[in-house]
Amino acid sequence: MSPATRPTGRRVRPERSGPNPNHALSEQGFERARRVLMRRDKVLGAVIKRHGRCGLGDHRTHQPFASLVGTIVSQQLSGKAADTIFKRVVALVGDHAGLTPVAVLAIEPEALRAAGLSRQKVTYVRDLAERVSTGTLDLHALDRHPDDAVIAAITAVKGLGRWSAEMFLMFRLNRPDVFPVGDLGIVKGVQKLYGMKRRPTPQTMERLAEPWRPYRSVAAWYLWRSLE
């Protein structure tokens, strides 16, 4: 990575009118993030110009339970295989709107296995459904919690780790400043975009992403796009 293409690495103070880190970005917020990132990082800025509007907000859903079931289903699977199995699970309850904790708990475990879920994933999905149905995990209340509290709540569910919580923060809650250094696509995006011979360490990625604060979620979305 040449000095000409390397971000400055200096600590950039959040702008005075920056986003509330515990609130979802609005469409205007996404546009502001694009302008800030293009100004601070010319290399990432070229990707932003090429792909235009940030589509992170398009994935926001008011069905967080179904979203997390989909996250569990997709673990260690290709996108196509995960989509096929998720559709089978949805068919067991009629439609997407019917994918509720109570409905999932009413499904026989063997029916979930027949839909394509491993025994381990059946355990994970049922643990999620039990926590939500009993109120131990209030997914809608997470809108009002800071990122660290959301991560703690999500990772308490069997089978859901930090990456799953970060995806929930970014795609479900549209939080502005999440940077999933453990995501392979983000690692590859940083390596390719900044001409690194080896895959960067989490520490290197954190340092490189410092100028992107408080909009690292938006930067991450464009890093994924850079691989297309």
Image: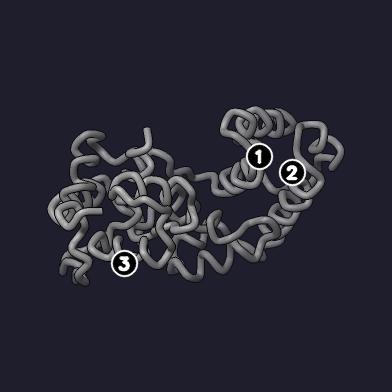
Q: For numbered disc 1, what is the local secondary structure?
A: loop
Assign the C terminus to one quadrant of the image.
top left
Q: Is residue 61 above or below residue 11?
A: above
Residue type (three-letter) at the residue carrying disc 3: Arg
Q: Nearer the viewer, residue 225 or 197?
A: 197
User: Which residue is denoted by mark 1 in the rendering?
Assistant: 99
User: Which residue is denoted by mark 3 in the rendering?
Assistant: 207
| Labels 1, 3: front one | 3
**Looking at the image, which residue is at 38% across and 42% down?**
224
C-alpha separation, residue under disc 2 versus residue under disc 1: 7 Å
Give coordinates of residue 27: x percent, y percent.
26, 45
Q: Residues within 10 Å of mark 2 (few under 14, many from 20)?
A: many
**Looking at the image, which residue is at 41% across and 46% down?**
188
Q: Nearer the viewer, residue 29 or 140?
A: 29
Check contact, mark 2 vs mark 1: CB within 8 A: yes
Q: For numbered disc 2, what is the local secondary structure?
A: helix
Give coordinates of residue 216: x percent, y percent.
32, 57
User: Which residue is denoted by mark 2 in the rendering?
Assistant: 104
Q: Is residue 144 left or right of residue 77?
A: left
Check contact, mark 3 vs mark 2: CB within 8 A: no
Q: Residues within 10 Å of mark 3 (few under 14, many from 20)?
A: some
Q: Is residue 5 above or below residue 19?
A: above
Q: What label does residue 2 carry, if any? A: none
